[in-house]
Image (cartoon, coloured by chain):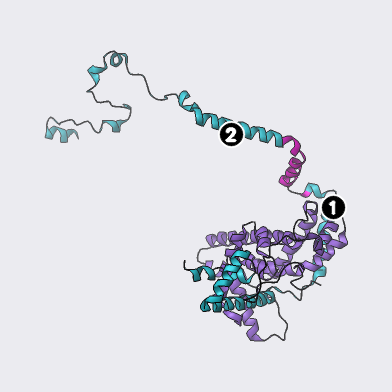
Amino acid sequence: MPQPRGTFRTAERPARNFTASGAFERVSAPVDTEADPDVQLMLAVQAGNTAAFERLFEKHIGAVVGFATQFVGSRARAEELAQDVFLQIYRTRQRYVARARFATWLYRMVTNACLSEVRRADYRARAHSLDQPGTRDTDDAVPIEVPTRSSEEDVAGREALEQLHTAVAALPAQQRAALLLARVEGLSYEEVAEALSCSVAAVKSLVHRATVTLRGQFPEEGM
Amino acid sequence: MSKCARIRSELTAWVDGELTARRDERVQRHLARCVACAAEAESVRATIQGQRRALSRLTAVPDLDTGPMWAAVQRGLAAADQPGAQATRPAWVRWRGELRGWQWLWRPVAVVGAATAVAVVVTVTMFGGPQKVLVPLGVEAPPPAVSRAPELFKDYPLIQHLDALENFDTVNAEPLDDGQASDHG
């Protein structure tokens, strides 16, 4: 079964600045790849160890599917996309260089796949609306599928989650990717920048804008 | 942008611990003496904590059945390992692989070609090469009579493209008789 989030963070990464008076340390310190167990697994995969690949798959597949669902809208499509990403990882394993955490490399591939899918979806939606003028408002949006929750979950919580899903889906794809990578997958801004192939300053701006936009809709702890 | 506005625009990165040590210190110093910004920082911190929790819930997939997915990945790996898999790949992927195999050959050729192109562009730009070889295409030499005594023809209007009728629209011909002109017209 997939492990819970946060397992990507290595021990040497300092905690986020959650106390206003807390001492600050820059997060984007050089990463000791030898301390990242995923890097060791990936190096084993490079050497042809299929069991190591299966362990990587089991560890990350849940997070990848959850991330991809926020882009492709459909859980089934997100699962297909996640499978494709892992196939790509195995096929390109010889090109892997252990210079950063494995999560950075993984999410670079995942993000590329998701953004490509979004662009394709946009293109299809535009082409469809041109074919059938007047149906854009109803057909243009990617179908939203909120993850299935347990039966104990209260209705109010479910509604809040659906609203949050809608708000996240309305963010521009780059902002959405930066926000999810930083907030959920625990990547530093520098790692997000590598995943999105942009500068750290751009990531800072993307995360800030996404945070402010969501804050306007879900102020404070009401999320 | 005022000092407070500048500090507030950095609060997200500050809470995320993503500022440089110098900027972080500057933010902390400002927050220590600005009550409004300190309150805003607390609000941003609470917002980010809330977003972190909510987004984690949103992207969680606790009911994911990884068994069939792993089986599908294994099938994909087996298909990729089969001898015929090379042929099923798109042609451009195979050509790209072939090109990569010949990098030792075409890379030097590409470098020499690029250097030659740059040298040609620089030479032409600096020494004005094309200016000297421009040929005045479409300009005919004047008739011999004009060449011999050009001062005799300097007051004559030049009518070009005599084969086009609209070039004669500007010739003002006074009608000899309005009645005749209308009859002919």
Residue B90 % position (x, y): 73, 48
Q: Secondary structure at mark 2?
A: helix
Q: Identify the residue position indicated by label 2 in the image.
A: B118
Q: Quick one: label 2 or label 1, which is nearer the N terminus?
A: 1
Residue B27 % position (x, y): 57, 70
- Can you say whether A164 is above or below B125 in the image? below
- Can you say whether B119 is above or below A150 in the image? above
Residue A43 % position (x, y): 83, 57
**Subunit that carries the residue with mark 1:** B
Residue A158 % position (x, y): 65, 82
Asked if residue B100 lies in the magenta stretch, the reply is yes
**Subunit that carries the residue with mark 2:** B
Q: Identify the residue position indicated by label 1 in the image.
A: B81
Number of other residues with Cα within 10 Å of mark 1, as a class: few under 14, some 14 to 19, many 20 or more: few
Name the colour assigned to chain A in the rendering.
Answer: purple
Q: Residue A186 lies in what quarter of the image?
A: bottom right
What residue lies at 59% left-to-right and 59% top-to-bottom? Answer: A123
Number of other residues with Cα within 10 Å of mark 2, as a class: few under 14, some 14 to 19, many 20 or more: few
Instruction: Tell me, by letter, which chain the rendering colours cyan.
Output: B
B85 sits to left or right of A183: right
Asked if residue A170 lies in the magenta stretch, the reply is no
Q: In the rendered image, is residue B72 in sight?
A: no
Residue A164 tag number: none
Amino acid at pointer 1: Asp
Span highlighted in magenta in the image: B88-106
Find the distance from the CA under tag 2 to the CA under tag 1: 45 Å
Q: Residue A126 lies in what quarter of the image?
A: bottom right
Q: Nearer the viewer's eye, disc 2 or disc 1?
A: 2
